[in-house]
Amino acid sequence: MFLLLAPAAPLSAQDPGRARTEAQARRAADRLAALHREAEQLAGESRSLLGDLRGLEVGRQIAAEQLRQVTADLATASAELAALDRDVRRLESEDRAELPELRRRLVELYKLGHGGYTHLLFATTDLRRVNQAARTVAMLVRTDRDRVEERRQRLVDLQAARVTLGQRTKALSALRITAERAQTAAVQAVARQNALLTQIDRRRDLTAQLAGELQVAQASLQRALATASAGAGANPPALPLEPFRGDLDWPAAGAVRRRFGSRPLRPSAAPVTNGIDIGAPEGAPVRTIHDGTVAFAEPFTGFGKLIIVQHDDRNTSLYGYLLDIDVARGDIVGRGDTIGSVGASPTGVAGLYFELRIDAQPVDPLQWLRRR
């Protein structure tokens, strides 16, 4: 019986490792499928934005053409208004130049008496020249009347045209302001759309990069499973953390009491916090957010009982203010494994301090944990 049971011990020892490897392989496959769906969604959004961008670009060109046309019309109206002003000034100048002659003629007519042109006609001594004098008087009367009327009408017409052009210029100026605003709005809309496209392109690139990392990890897991099937024991390769951004499990159930970067409750502490405080009842389980290796598991000043899990060469997670520690340094833990229980902070309030470091720099955990 002993001999029959002896070979079973190594197989039993290999089962937990194989089960963990299979779980990691399933998790990698599920996340890879989610990334592919996200990539397809981003591609659809990109196509939709490109269609919208073409419409916005046409609108921008129309707005630019409208502004150009209004600007040209305004320049033409301004030039015509300036020409009218020159005509008015010219007529006024001519009137001022002819004023002495008009005055002299008025004086001469005054000297002729109330008869005016009639006195001039009867002053002719030669009766044979009466017809000629009459024609001369009539011509003078008609010339003076026509000149005065022509000047008056010309000034009236110029003033009317000037008023009309002034109103047109004012209307065109208002249209130009409207066209400038429309063009500015169109340019800004195009810029916003381009910014969205750039953002989506970056997300697509990141998704493709993360999918590539997962595919590499998935291939390693398949090789590990094949090795385990052949009877050779091997530690399962660690899954990369970055592809699971936004999909990581919460370390404890509870509401966030203090956010990343907020000021601490204790004035003597550091000015801001590098993690979050999760309100949870004392003794509640604390679970790992991702596969990794326990790098630290003992009390630490300022964090109470602290566990640090090393997920890969660059990324770690910290779990502080623990009541109990259920793991030891060097232990391999999987996502969702219980590693301790919730304790109390130095203020006596029960809760979990959680911190996530990416490339050795603290980041906002809420951007990495699954939304709930």
Image (spheres, grey):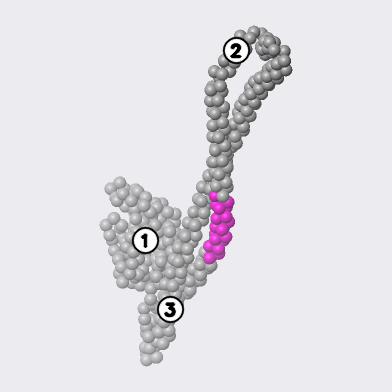
Near mark 3 (Cα within 10 A), the count class, few <14, some 14-19 or many ≥20, is some
Mark 1 residue type: Leu
- The amino acid marked with disc number 2 is Glu
Above or below for 231 versus 201:
below
Mark 2 — residue?
108
Residue 105 position by quadrant = top right
Q: Nearer the viewer, residue 114 or 172?
A: 114
Q: Secondary structure at mark 3?
A: helix
Residue depicted at x 62% and y 32%? 161
Relative vertical location of residue 150 with respect to residue 241 in this rendering, above or below:
above
Q: Earlier in the sequence, mark 2 or mark 3?
A: 2
- Looking at this view, is 219 or 296 the one in front? 219
Task: Identify the residue at image location x=59%, y=12%.
Answer: 107
Q: Which residues are magenta?
A: 43-64
Tell which of 132 and 372 is nearer to you.
132
Q: Earlier in the sequence, mark 1 or mark 2?
A: 2
Closer to the camera, 97 or 156? Answer: 97
Residue bearing mark 1: 356
